[in-house]
Image (cartoon, helix red, strand yellow):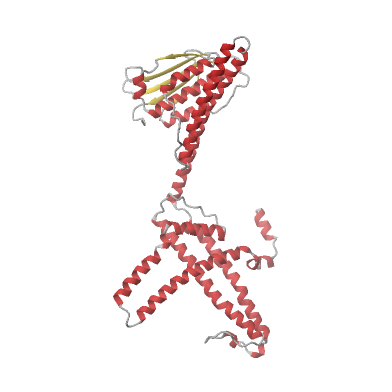
Amino acid sequence: MTGQARSSSTVPAWRRMTAPLRSGATLRAGVLLVIGGVVAGAYVLLAGGFAQMFAQEQTPRMATTVLAVLAGVLVCLPPFLAPVRTLEIAAVRAFLEVPVPVPRTDATAGAATRWRAAAWYCLHLALGAVLVAVLLVAIPVATQFVLSAIGLEPVLVAEWAPWSLVPSWAGTWILALAALVLLVAIPYLIAAERVLLRQAAVPLLGPDQSERIAELEAAADLAAERGRVARELHDSVGHALTVTTLQAAAAARLLESDPPAARAALSAIEETGRSAMADLDHVLGLLRAERGQGEPAARAPMRTLADLGVLLDDAAQAGAQVTTSAALSGDELANLPRATSQEAYRVVQEALTNALRHAPAEPVTVSVQVISAGGGAPAGADPHLEVRVQNPLSPVPIPGGAAGGRGLTGMAERVRLLRGDLTAGPDGRADAGSWVVRARFPLADSPR
């Protein structure tokens, strides 16, 4: 037995029996039902008006029929409108405390969803009409019972006077008890209708399969976008912090012995900071645009392999011995798909950051080349861009070096998004003491 079941079993029976009389939930549900009853009353008045018009002989039948049809179409439209469904869901969440998911404003509801919402609308109005009818009868009758019990004349003019059915010998207490029963029955009626509405809320107002799929797709898109922003921040800011740390350490060492070299290191820190701020401005611009807050006035463009020379110079200034092989020409860079060039640049940047962090002042070889059939790829293979970064493994752990970071995971995600593949680890074929990062991006049908 659960804790909730045990706690409910310990509640005295009289408290459970009188809960509708004491609960605020009954009052909130009553408000919702009265609203539905008032709207249902408008429908009843409209139907009664047309019935009265048709009952009169002098009423033009054709014009009245056309008017009735138009009015019927207009009054039947609201249950099928998406804003009405959204309003009903908000009312259910507020008055009935049922956590019905709020539909996305850009989601298109299907026909089944609209019909279910219309069924809820009719149920709401029907139960509300029952409650309003009971209120309109029970309260005046109970009032007259009380007046009759104290000896006052009837104040209601009606052919049906239920208080006259009580025999005079029964005494006034019978009238008072009847009035009390009538008034006490109203909260129990509200409680019963509340239970019915709560049970029908999710089946009739809840999301259908298409809306659930849309919500899942939106959640997946949001998660993918967050991952992309996290990768951008990790790669750009992480690289800048690594370079800045190494340059600051070099400046501290050379401040007394080689002031010009220390100034050069400080200048490199300044330039790296500007570059990091530009990258951060780009990421923040993406966030503002996707949140509908407008396009920023100035936003730094995404870096591509065309900026590889600046990246390699920054790494060299940070102490790495960078060499390149098979670098692409300007025409080849221009012909690369932009998305591929951007992600390849980030892979090289992250690989250089890891090399600077784990093996500073060691030689690093960077190779970026297009491999096609006859140029190293098997016959019939599609051309692809290969990025390769190799550096010696440091024999001694670096103090403060990060382990188990997100760099490799981010690189793999970037490459996988473009249907490529990534390998990273010790290269036993060429040099057992080397760490090699190799990424391959297919160029056929790549997004440009």
Q: Is residue 146 left or right of residue 341?
A: right
**Residue 336 percent coordinates (x, y):** 36, 25
Q: Is residue 144 left or right of residue 363?
A: right
**Residue 160 percent coordinates (x, y):** 53, 86
Going by the picture, which residue comes out furthest to the left?
62
Q: Is residue 153 left or right of residue 278?
A: right
Q: As displayed, is residue 107 above or below residue 157?
A: above
Give whichever of 155, 167 is nearer the camera: 155
Q: Which residue appears at 32% of the width and 82% of the height?
A: 58
Going by the picture, which residue comes out furthest to the top?
257
Q: Can the viewer see residue 356 in this picture?
A: yes
**Residue 134 percent coordinates (x, y):** 54, 75
Give whichever of 419, 282 is nearer the camera: 282
Q: Which residue appears at 30% of the width and 74% of the height?
A: 63
Quarter of the picture containing the C terminus is top left
**Residue 179 percent coordinates (x, y):** 63, 79
> On the image, which quarter does residue 189 sit in?
bottom right
Q: As displayed, is residue 408 above or below residue 157?
A: above
Q: Can the viewer see residue 394 in this picture?
A: no
Q: As displayed, is residue 151 above or below residue 36?
A: below
